[in-house]
């Protein structure tokens, strides 16, 4: 759902662009 996607985005922002955060962001955007 949209809410679930928003939760993932929030977690990605909390992790930042470092290490796993960057990988998660790339996988989610793909």
Image (spheres, grey):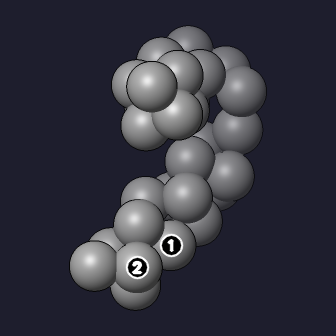
Q: Residue at x 45, y 25 (%)?
A: 30
Residue that badge 1 annotates: 6
Is residue 20 visible in the rendered image? The answer is no
The answer to which quarter of the image holds residue 4 is bottom left
Rendered location of residue 9, percent (x, y): 55, 58
Q: Residue at x 43, y 37 (%)?
A: 28
Q: Which mark is residue 2?
A: 2
Give the crowd class for mark 2: few <14, some 14-19, many >=20 residues within 10 Å: few
Query: On screen, 30 above or below 29?
Result: above
Question: Observer-nearest residue: 6 or 18?
Answer: 6
Secondary structure under tag 1 reads helix
Q: Which mark is residue 29?
A: none
Q: Are marks 1 and 2 in contact (CB under 8 Å)?
A: yes
Is residue 22 visible in the rendered image? The answer is yes
Rendered location of residue 7, percent (x, y): 44, 72
Secondary structure under tag 2 reads helix
Quarter of the image containing the N terminus? bottom left
């Amino acid at each position: 759902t949209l809410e679930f996607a928003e939760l993932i985005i929030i977690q990605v922002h909390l992790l930042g662009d470092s290490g796993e955060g960057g990988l998660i962001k790339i996988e989610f955007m793909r």
